[in-house]
Image: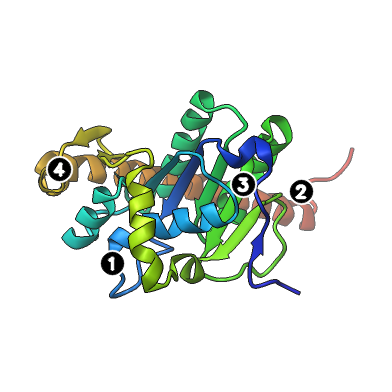
Amino acid sequence: MWQEEYLAAATPEYATAQIAVWWDIEGCQIPEGYDARWVRPSIEGELRKLGYFGPVSITAYGDHKQTSDDHLRGLSSTGVALSHTIPEVIYKRMNSDMRDWRLDNPPPATIMLISDHVEFLFAKGLVHVQQGDKYNLFLAYSFRPYKMSILVTSAEWLWESLLAVSETRRHVLRKCSERSESTGMFYCNVCFCDCQSSGDYRMHLSSDEHKQQEACIISVIRSNDQDKEYWLRKTVEKEQTFEESSSDGSWSSS
């Protein structure tokens, strides 16, 4: 039977270690009416309750052309990094960035994934990471998984409960976030370039050069899919030809 949440207190080796949060903002969205400035303090507040006081970096991945200006400004003002990508490659980009981060941040360190697709898209790789390098792992998701994870986690939350912080604590938590590592940036994970402000970011994402780059990626993906479909179809045709030949006696033993 599933527990509502699984939360374990920090062990000494991880209590002050680096914490990197990888957030799929497409699947685990900011609730309607929720102030984006509360996301970071709410996450940090939950971590501190468990005894984690290390520097926290948070990166929100998604199609930020669809992210409102209020959310862009609110997240970036509290040090949340914004990484624009498109749905077709969002998890590939997250995986790639996570690998790069691990090269610079050996354990003890904590990885936190906020996504509904951890088991399907990240679990296999993370199992090997945990076995070899012993990273601490947190998960958050918008709905409870239908089966037990193969991953060893120290804490798991439902996304709504992770954000559900009382009004009386918000001011205190915001002060805590101001003392944490500032990672706010505007990054395009399609064109691989930084922007200096939300205005520059918006301008870049609407530029012809950016649109062409997105179209190029989508075209390559579709071409690869068509190639896979073509070879699958040819394989099926060969198997059907073999079966038909076998059934009419064309393939007989000498």
**Distance (Cα) linking label 2 and label 3:** 59 Å
**226 in relation to 29, above or below:** above
Judge depth for marks 1 and 2 and give the one in front.
1
Q: Are marks 1 and 2 in contact (CB under 8 Å)?
A: no
Mark 3 burial class by Cα count in 10 Å: few <14, some 14-19, many 20+: many
Between discs 1 and 3, the one toward the N terminus: 1
- Extreme residue in the top direction: 104
**Distance (Cα) linking label 1 and label 2:** 72 Å
Q: Is residue 25 visible?
A: no
Residue pointed to by mark 1: 35
**Distance (Cα) linking label 2 and label 4:** 71 Å
Judge depth for marks 2 and 4 and give the one in front.
4
Judge depth for marks 2 and 3 and give the one in front.
3
Residue pointed to by mark 3: 137
Residue pointed to by mark 2: 250
Q: Position of residue 186 (x, y in %)?
A: 24, 42
Residue pointed to by mark 4: 197
Q: Residue at x 60, y 54 (%)?
A: 50
Q: Quadrant of residue 244?
A: bottom right
Secondary structure beneath dot 2 equals loop
Q: Residue at x 22, y 34 (%)?
A: 194
| Residue situated in front as seen by the camera: 35 or 174 | 174
Secondary structure beneath dot 4 equals loop
Amino acid found under the numbered disc labelled 4: Ser
Figure quadrant of the C terminus? top right
Q: Position of residue 169 (x, y in %)?
A: 40, 66
Amino acid found under the numbered disc labelled 3: Leu
